Every structure is written in C-alpha cells, then in structure tokens.
Amino acid sequence: MKERHFQRRHLHRRHVEEGIVKALMVLSFMLLAGSLGFILITILIKGLPALNWDMLTKTPQGGFYLGKEGGILNAIIGSLYLAGGATLLAILVSLPLALYLGTYVRRARWADFVRLSMDILWGIPSIVYGAFGFTIMLALGMRASLLAGILVLTLLEFPIMTRAIEEVVRMVPHDLEQASYALGSTRLETALRVVTRQMLPGIVTAILLAFGRGIGDAASVLFTAGFTDRIPTSLFQPVASLPLAVFFQLSTPFPEVQQRAYASALILTAIVLIISFGSRWLATRLGRNIIK
C-alpha cells in the first residue's frame, strides 16, 4: 500500500511539473509572438503612410531632412553593399576555419580555446567593434568609408558564421566520413566533397543569419562607414545605411521626417524577414538530398 501510494504521489508530482513546464513554454511563446507582432504593427501603422515609390527609388534631395523631397535609395544600396561585402569576406574566413575545427581537430584543447574565443567575440557589443575599427582607422590615417564599414562588419559576422557552420559540421553523420575514408579519400577531399555537400543547407542558413545581423547593425558602422546622401562609387567613399537613416530621421524635430524613419524601419524589417524566410526555404530545398 505504501509503495502504491508513493508511486501515485510521484506520478502526480510529475504531472504537475509537466504542466508547469508546458505553461512556461506557452507563456514564452506568447511573449515572443506578442513582442514581434507589436513591433510589426507599430512599424506598419506609423511607417506605411509615409512609404511611397520615391522613398525606394530616389536619394535624399535638398532639404530632405526638413521634410522635402527625396528618398532613401542611398541607404538601401549602402546597407546591401556593407552587409554583402562583409558576408563575402566572412565566408572566406569562416568556412575553412569551421571545416578545420569540425573535421581535423574536433577535440583538441586549442580547438576548444578557439571555440571559446568565437563565443566571446559573438557576445561583444557591436559598438565595441565600431570603437575598435575607429581606433585602427585613426592609426592608419583612414577616413570613414565603405571599406572600413565592410571590415568592421566582417569582424562582427565572422564569429557568428563560424560557430553556426561548425555546429552544422558536427551534425554530419560520422559513418559517412568513415565511408569516405574507406574509399581512399583524404581528409581534405572528405571535408570539401562530402562534409560540405552534406551541410550545404546549414551553410546557407549561417550565411543568411550573419547577413541579417550585418544589415541591421548600426553601432559598428556609426564611426567607420560614415553617412552620405549619395550612392558610393568607390570603396574609399562614405556610405549610408538603413539603421543610421532611421536614427538620423528620428533625430529631427519634423514629424514628417520622423514618419519617414518608421517607413525606413519598415523597409529594413521587410529585408530581414525576406532573408529569414528565404533561408528557411533554401534550407528545405537543399536538405532534400541530405543523408541523415
């Protein structure tokens, strides 16, 4: 009888614990979905009335920040330049490093130190990257430019992409690698022809994740990329970006320009959402032929 009573109490306690955990999960989901919905609704209500074709196709004209004509084409293209260039450079460094850590030295002590360093770099605030880049610029005599912004954003995206790709490498079936070795492949051939093909969906997701972080960051490019109403034609010219466009437009005392800031935020949010949904879609399409 005592044993049966104990089992009932234990089962009841487990049901209570499970109910509490489920309630916390539902509450967390509601907070997350509610926050996202509130942000999107706020941006849509305040930004949609100011959104027009001129904002997407024109650069700021004379008196734009006083409420006159023009658009933010310079900031849209500038953000794509910055995030695109930084993502390309980050791929060239992150992919080889992630493959080396995940294929060659999985459990080496110094590899764990590299992973820890990547995690620390991932957690550093972006304003610190901007201050670091600004210090280097002063030492080299550089001015704010597209090149400086790309380099700082590369430092920002590099740890994100490396850790994301390495986690995907770990998910590749170990038996698949052993089969490749058994057929006479070297580690390099296995890494490039087997592992890379298997983790292609994860690589795409990591790249788009880093791109989304880069295109939405303002602090790291505030001191390094500068801001201009023109579209840059050289790597050594300053460049505008959407986050800074939002910041500068909100800083003006004119309600019409402040409303344009919400329209700019709406455009930036739409780009990030397209990237997010695009990464999901590409990962699903590319994952159809993956061996699990």
Image: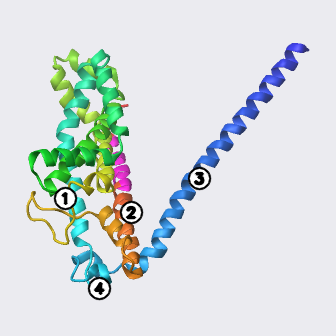
Quarter of the image where one finds residue 110:
top left
Residue at 51 percent across and 68 percent down: it is 41
User: Mark 2 vs mark 1: which is more N-terminal?
Assistant: 1
What x and y, as percent, mark residue 195?
A: 25, 30
Q: Within 10 Å of the Cα at label 4, are there few (<14), some (14-19), or many (20+) other Cα atoms?
A: few
Q: Contact, CB < 8 Å: mark 3 with mark 1?
A: no
Q: Is residue 48 visible?
A: yes
Using the image as rendered, state which of residue 180 and residue 161 is in the foreground.
161
Cα–Cα span, label 2 and label 3:
19 Å
Q: Quadrant of the C terminus?
A: top left
Q: Any magenta on residue 286?
A: yes
In the image, taking residue 104 as reference, residue 278 lies left or right, namely: right
User: Mark 2 vs mark 3: which is more N-terminal?
Assistant: 3
Q: Which mark is residue 68?
A: 4
Cα–Cα span, label 3 and label 1:
34 Å
Using the image as rendered, state which of residue 48 and residue 253 is in the foreground.
253
Q: Which mark is residue 31?
A: 3
Quarter of the image where one finds residue 228:
bottom left
Q: Which residues are magenta?
A: 276-288
Q: Contact, CB < 8 Å: mark 1 with mark 4?
A: no
Label 2's element?
helix
Cα–Cα span, label 2 and label 1:
17 Å
Q: Nearer the viewer, mark 3 or mark 4?
A: 4
User: Mark 4 vs mark 2: which is more N-terminal?
Assistant: 4
Q: Nearer the viewer, mark 1 or mark 4?
A: 4
Label 3's element?
helix
Q: Within 10 Å of the Cα at label 1, are there few (<14), some (14-19), or many (20+) other Cα atoms?
A: many
Q: Which mark is residue 269?
A: 2
User: Mark 3 vs mark 1: which is more N-terminal?
Assistant: 3
Residue located beneath label 1 in the image: 81
Q: Any magenta on residue 100?
A: no
